[in-house]
Image (cartoon, rainbow, N blue to C red):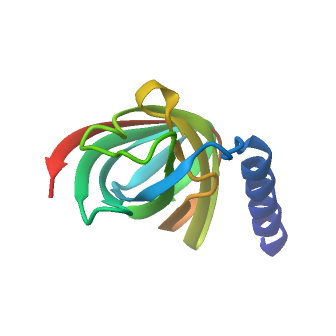
């Protein structure tokens, strides 16, 4: 089992490194923290509800978003509610309450046997002007193995 876990983590790291776009023209604008609902892998995919808070780097503002993350690919197992964290990059440094609204697409993978970790590479948002850092940190508890294509949809829910 330790060998399978090591291979899964290595595959996630390789997948995330290979799929990350260049960010030479991007500004680091803040952090997006999301809490997720429990997930049941349905062999070929899964879906989770998210509640996210964006913390702006320049101004001390917070914007609340609700979303849904869908995975298509290998997804076996069950995980409890968890959390995801991304550094957010944008093409300009002006961030408003609806800037992160939109669809993000990319690759993801995670493994859990008790405590679990995952990685997500997503790009998209308003006019594809926002990138969620190549490797997000995903924490959960359960028994799960997942790798595939991920779609994240975010909608604004106001300022906190």
**Screen quadrant of the N terminus:** bottom right
> Visible in this render: residue 72?
no
20 shown above or below 155: below
Q: Position of residue 153 (x, y in %)?
A: 39, 34
Residue 40 or residue 104, whichever sits in front: 104
Residue 110: quadrant of the picture: bottom right
Q: Position of residue 22 (x, y in %)?
A: 71, 43
> Horizontal placement of 5 versus 81: left or right?
right
**Against 31, is 22 above or below?**
above
- Who's the residue at 33% across and 35% down the image? 101
Q: How many marks?
A: 0
Quarter of the image that includes the C terminus: bottom left
Residue 56 found in image quarter:
bottom left
The residue located at (37%, 40%) in the rendering is 100
Query: Which quadrant of the structure image shows residue 111?
Result: bottom right
Q: Residue 12: horizontal and vertical position, in percent?
A: 73, 55
Q: Residue furthest top?
A: 127
In this rendering, position of residue 144 left or right of residue 56: right
Q: Is residue 37 above or below residue 139?
A: above
Residue at 56% across / 63% down in the picture? 143
Identify which residue, 152 or 39, lies in the foreground: 152
**Is residue 127 shown to the viewer in this render?**
yes
Residue 64 percent location from the top left of the image = 23, 52
């Amino acid at each position: 089992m330790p060998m399978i876990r090591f291979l899964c983590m290595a595959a996630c790291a390789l997948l995330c490194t290979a799929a990350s776009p260049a960010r030479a023209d991007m500004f680091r604008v803040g952090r997006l923290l999301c809490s997720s609902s429990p997930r049941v892998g349905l062999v070929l995919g899964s879906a989770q509800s998210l509640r996210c808070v964006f913390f702006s780097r320049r101004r001390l503002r917070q914007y609340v978003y609700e979303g849904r993350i869908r995975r298509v690919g290998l997804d076996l197992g069950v995980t409890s509610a968890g959390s995801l964290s991304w550094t957010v990059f944008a093409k300009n440094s002006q961030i408003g309450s609806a800037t992160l609204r939109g669809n993000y697409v990319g690759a993801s993978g995670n493994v859990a046997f008790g405590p679990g970790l995952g990685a997500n590479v997503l790009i998209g948002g308003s006019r594809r002007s926002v990138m969620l850092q190549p490797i997000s940190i995903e924490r959960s508890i359960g028994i799960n193995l997942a790798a595939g294509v991920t779609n994240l949809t975010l909608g604004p829910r106001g300022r906190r």
